[in-house]
Image: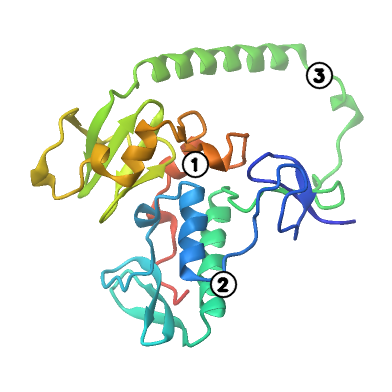
Amino acid sequence: MVSKKHCPFCNQLVEQNEQVCPHCGEENRAPKTIEELLAYCEKRGMPLHRMRFFIGENYKKARAFGIYEDGGRYIVYKNKANGERATRYSGPDEAHAVRELFLKLLDECHKRDIYPDGRPEYGTSDKPQPTGLVSKNKSRANPVLVSVIVLSLLLVGVLTFTFLVGHWYSSGYYKLNNSYYIHKGSSWFYAGETDWHITRGVPSENVEYLGKEYDPGWGIVEFEQSETGKDYQAGKYNTYSGSRDSYGSSSSDYSSSDYGSWDSGDTDWSSDW
């Protein structure tokens, strides 16, 4: 049986190794250069620094994956929790170096049930089967159990609605630790060194609201003056999907809450890779 996955752009089923979706025409091939890897991540709204991936950067502090070029050599590294650096690859083959980091990036995403490369579709033979024998006496639904389940679902729905109503976020600038964010419409962006980048979902419930006015003392570029901010003001961002209109607004397998809840503490920072 041919292995299939859901296209991360239109959610249609495609063959696992399909590079271009036959339904929506979006390209989903593996990046081969550092620039392509950056574009791949930006297209999917990955908050790379919060994910602890530093692409094109020789990041020196602890807890980091990264890749950078130095005199024609491409170095892929991991900085462990104790600050020790483990070099995964160092050589002239950029495509190989990028693939090493790309596969690690996907692995970290998959561990968190996030599939930027498309969620796999498992056949009946691939699904884990329940173990043990089921008694014939349990084939009929217990009416008391059904009632409890229904009431529980109703309670969860009420609590979820109450939670959401109480957690609306005002438009404006926010700060979390040493990172700056801005909430525009239904989209979140985080400040990079020279531009702002889309991120999916609230970075954390602990974000500090700074207000709607920009402060030059923050040491970041004003959102409205950045390239991303200009694109946003020109209507080039789809605020529902959290992506540029040119990238489409179809449903996908990575939702706005996936990267918003990313916890780098879930990574094993003690191993070499």
Residue that badge 1 annotates? 258
Other residues around mark 1 within 10 Å, as few (<14) / some (14–19) / many (≥20): some
Frontmost of labels 2 and 3 is: 2
Percent of width and height locating residue 16: 76, 57
Q: Which of 147 and 59 lies nearest the eye of the viewer?
A: 59
- Disc 1 to disc 2, how far (Cα)? 23 Å
Percent of width and height locating residue 64: 36, 66
Q: Is residue 55 above or below residue 226?
A: below
Q: Amino acid at mark 3?
A: Ala
Local secondary structure at mark 2: helix
Frontmost of labels 1 and 2 is: 2
Instruction: Give whichever of discs 1 and 2 has the lower sequence position.
Output: 2
Residue that badge 3 annotates? 141
Quadrant, the N terminus: bottom right
For residue 185, the mark is: none
- Disc 3 to disc 1, how far (Cα)? 34 Å
- Disc 2 to disc 3, how far (Cα)? 50 Å
Local secondary structure at mark 3: loop
